[in-house]
Structure formats: structure tokens, C-alpha cells
Amino acid sequence: MEEEGGRADMDLTSKIAERSEQDLLPLKEDLAEWLSRVLQEKITAENLLDCLDNGVLVCKLAQIVQSAAQDCIKAGKSVKSLAPFSNKFHQNAKAGTFFARDNAAHFLQWCRQIEIEDSVLFESDGLVLQKQPREVILCLLEIARVGANYGIEPPKLVKLEKEIDDEIAAEEEKKPELKPIRKEKKVSKAASIDAEVARLAAKYNVRIEKIKEGRYVVDGKINIFVRILRNHVMVRVGGGWDTLEHFISRHDPNKIGRILTSTPQACSHHHHHSQIPGMPCSAST
């Protein structure tokens, strides 16, 4: 009996790990595409962590962002200066070595100097031994948001965040919304989102109503923003993102630990992003 129980526990652990990997895939794809462009390296979702675990590329990324900030200041743009990042990192560090850990520590120190919040930072071994893939990805997306302030074109998810923030700001100011330029594409995407929302709502027995294009309300009280990222349907959660299916599956009323019924606490996860009313913070789940 104990052996069967142990096997069941292993199966559950394996399923959780597999599901976690699936939920991270859209973020990994988006980040890999961005890093490939910014670093001029061949990085994919599959090799992302292997490319990063010696700490060399994250240090080079810090240099690029810091250099972009300096260029903005030289050009007379009113932007915040960033802490300098030293050239003295180990450019030939091998994975798993002290030098890789030193690179990771060097990068994390810079992150703290430029005021990246602790909630999205990782431990050195989290990068070097690939123990904290989610934290590494969230941290680098945060660096991408910083880079966007200095003219570095951001990942698509960050662009979608700005689109949502602009929509919220326009509503608060009661400004008329801009008409979409590519109307046919928009209609097609809207239909795809509506169909997927309806499918998942039926699958998990959750009541979801459409408010407007890309925005829905769950159980009459939780306002969500939904967007398509490549072939993934994503929902904005607090300051981050989740796949729509994972988000809705956690809301299944037939499961123990329904996470969205409790009163959400104020989220300090991303102080510079708008918190969606009634939404939990992804950092706390």
C-alpha cells in the first residue's frame, strides 16, 4: 500500500511539474524571442535556461539596458539614470561553476540597485542550477519593462500590458477609444478569444460574460483582460500573465482551494502597473 501511495505522490508531482512547464511556455517563447533580438543570440523557449545558466547573457543584457539608459540621457531625454553595470563579469564562465554563480550574483546586485522588486528576483542557484525557472523568467520580463523606458523594443506581452493600461487610462479619463487600424484581424482575434473563453467556461463550469472586446467578467465580480499571444490565449493577472485555461481551472467551483473567492489583498508585486480591481496577484499563488 505504501508503495502505491508513493507512486501516486510521484505521479502527482510529475503532473504538477508538467503543468507548470506548460503554463510557463508562452512566457518562455516571448522572452526567448526578445532576448534573441536584443542579445543577437539564437535563443528558443526550449534552450532558454541552458543559454542563461552560466550568467553571461544576463550580465550582457544588463550592460545593454544600462547603455541604452546612458544614450537616452546623452540625447537630452528626461529619463531616470540607471546604476552602472561593471564589465568585470566572467565572460567565459561554464555552467554550474563558481564563476557562473558570481555572474548571477553580480546581475542580481544590479537588479536591486535599479530597484527591481524582491518579489521577482531569484537566488543565484535558481539561475545556475535552473531551480527557479518562473522567477528567472519574471525577472527578465521586468528587465524588459525597464529597457522599454529607454527605447529598447519590448516583448509582445509587455506591449499588450501597455495596451491594457492605455485602455484603462482612457476609460478613467472618459476619452473615446481609438479605432483599430487592422479591423479584420481584430475581428478574427476577438472571435477566437470569445470561442476559447466560451469553451473553457463550459469545461470548468464557470460563468463568464463578455463586457467588450478582450474583457470579461467572471462570476459577475472578477474583471479580466484576455489577449492572444501567438497561439496562446492569455489573461492578465495582477502585474503578470497566466494562460486562460490555467486561470479558469483554478477557479473550478468543484475543486478544493478555490482561489478567487477570498478578498484580494493589495498587490505590491509591480508597483508601476495598474492593478485590476478584484484580481489576485500572480506572485501570491
Image: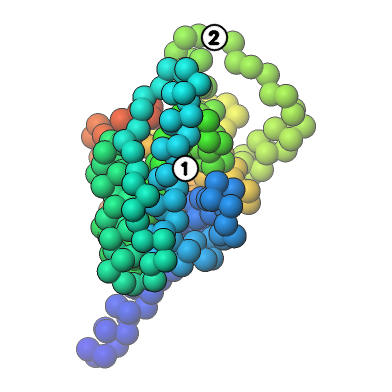
Measured as percent of width and height from the top left, residue 62 is found at 40, 45
Q: Residue at x 65, y 36 (%)?
A: 190
Q: Earlier in the sequence, mark 1 or mark 2?
A: 1
Measured as percent of width and height from the top left, residue 129 is found at 33, 69
Measured as percent of width and height from the top left, residue 225 is found at 49, 34
- Please name the residue that numbered disc 1 is placed on: 64
Could you tell me which secondary element the residue under label 2 belongs to? Answer: loop
Say which of 35 and 29 sits in front: 35
Q: Amino acid at mark 1?
A: Ile
Determine whether, in the image, residue 53 is placed left or right of residue 184. left
Residue 144: give its label: none
Circle 2 Cα neighbour tier, 10 Å, few/some/many (<14 / 14–19 / ≥20): few
Could you say which quadrant of the image residue 280 lies in? top left
Between label 1 and label 2, give the one nearer the viewer: 1
Residue that sits furthest to the right in the current view: 184
Q: Amino acid at mark 2?
A: Lys
- Say if 24 sits above or below 92 in the image: above
Measured as percent of width and height from the top left, residue 257 is found at 28, 53
Q: How many marks?
A: 2
Say which of 200 and 59 sits in front: 59
- Say if 153 sits above or below 129 in the image: above
- Please name the residue that numbered disc 2 is placed on: 175
